[in-house]
């Protein structure tokens, strides 16, 4: 694997040369648009909204819509004027406690790998972060864009996790989220009991993308059948939701399922979704 970025970690007078490697990947199935008659790929054209005419690349400029239908054009020199200097340095600004950071701020992780002469300082920073329970909050420029990031110890590695700036997060104030409600002592005790029974040790390997697996399996079968859809096997009928308002009975049914699963040794399934709760009884 080739690094996507090389530079250094810098805090106080310490500099650690590192290389940046992806720590995650998106397993998405990509599709092409085809003409149904001969499966010829369909390409997009750049057309102007006013007259529908195709526009060549040399006639296209970048514009910002500051009012509905009103644009200001930005040229290359405009972008150069506000460009953040790419110093190839991950500048740690502060060290903060990890538990103080809302997980919603974290976005995408990368592995930090030390280069020659930086191994000891790398291990020193990693161990100091682990011992203090802190993470380094830094700014870094990657591909001409400045990012907020956190440097965290992960086993023997240091991970750089790109973060959202505060003004990038949407506040839920306009969403229909219930405030404090009187859910009832019995309902709360039963819900708490259900959560406790379904609690297990975190094992990321047990969670897989069922949709992608099923889709790739279907694609493989269609390839084997010459592009034709293979015969469909038996499918389970979907349960129709019903307007049930007895929250206690829903919780009791879920607890019974959890209790039965625990005694049979089977994996506990999520509570039945056939009930649609409107209001606690």
Image: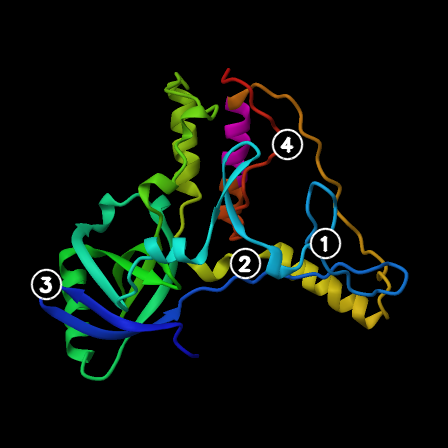
Label 3 secondary element: loop
Image depth: mark 1 or mark 4 in front: 1
**Where is residue 50 drawn, in percent x and y?**
70, 40
Residue found 43% across the figure and 23% down from its top: 187
Label 1 secondary element: loop
Residue found 40% across the figure and 66% down from its top: 23
- Given residues 246 and 159, the one toward you in this image is 159
Q: Tell me if residue 133 can be seen.
A: yes
The magenta segment: 248-257
Q: Answer with mark 4 or mark 3, whichever residue precedes in sequence.
A: 3
Residue found 80% across the figure and 52% down from its top: 234
Q: Which mark is residue 208?
A: 2
Image depth: mark 2 or mark 3 in front: 3
Q: Answer with mark 2 or mark 4, whichever residue precedes in sequence.
A: 2
Could you tell me if the residues under marks 2 and 1 are in contact, i.e. CB atoms within 8 Å? no
Q: Which residue is mark 4?
A: 274
Could you tell me if the residues under marks 2 and 4 are in contact, i.e. CB atoms within 8 Å? no
Q: Answer with mark 2 or mark 3, whichever residue precedes in sequence.
A: 3
Q: Which residue is mark 1?
A: 54
Image depth: mark 4 or mark 3 in front: 3
How far apart are the two marked residues, 2 and 4, measured between alpha carbons? 24 Å
Label 4 secondary element: loop
Q: Is residue 210 above or below residue 184?
A: below
How far apart are the two marked residues, 2 and 3, measured between alpha carbons? 42 Å
**Where is residue 124 drawn, in percent x and y?**
14, 71
**Where is residue 186 drawn, in percent x and y?**
41, 21
Q: Answer with mark 1 or mark 4, whichever residue precedes in sequence.
A: 1
Q: Which residue is mark 3?
A: 12
How far apart are the two marked residues, 3 and 1, measured between alpha carbons? 54 Å
Q: Answer with mark 2 or mark 1, whichever residue precedes in sequence.
A: 1
């Amino acid at each position: 694997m080739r690094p996507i970025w090389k530079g250094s970690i810098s805090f106080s007078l310490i500099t650690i040369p590192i290389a940046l490697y992806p720590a995650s990947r998106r397993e998405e199935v990509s599709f092409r648009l085809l003409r149904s008659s001969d499966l010829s790929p369909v390409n997009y054209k750049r057309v102007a909204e006013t007259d529908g005419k195709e526009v060549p690349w040399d006639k296209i400029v970048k514009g910002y819509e500051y009012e509905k239908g009103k644009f200001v054009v930005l040229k290359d020199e405009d972008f150069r004027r506000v460009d953040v200097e790419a110093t190839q340095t991950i500048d740690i600004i502060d060290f903060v406690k990890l538990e103080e950071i809302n997980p919603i701020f974290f976005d995408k992780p990368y592995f930090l790998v030390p280069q020659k002469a930086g191994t000891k300082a790398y291990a020193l920073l990693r161990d100091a972060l682990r011992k203090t329970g802190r993470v380094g909050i830094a700014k870094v420029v990657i591909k001409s864009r400045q990012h907020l990031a956190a440097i965290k110890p992960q086993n023997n590695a240091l991970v750089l996790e790109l973060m959202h700036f505060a003004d990038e997060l949407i506040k839920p104030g306009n969403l229909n989220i219930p405030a404090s409600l009187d859910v009832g002592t019995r309902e709360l005790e039963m819900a708490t009991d259900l959560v406790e029974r379904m609690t297990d040790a975190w094992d990321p390997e047990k969670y897989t993308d069922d949709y992608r697996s099923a889709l790739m399996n279907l694609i493989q079968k269609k390839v084997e059948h010459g592009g034709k859809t293979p015969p469909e096997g038996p499918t389970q009928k979907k349960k129709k939701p019903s307007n049930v308002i007895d929250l206690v009975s829903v919780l009791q049914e879920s607890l019974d399922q959890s209790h039965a699963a625990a005694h049979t040794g089977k994996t506990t399934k999520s509570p039945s979704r056939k009930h649609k709760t409107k209001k606690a009884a």
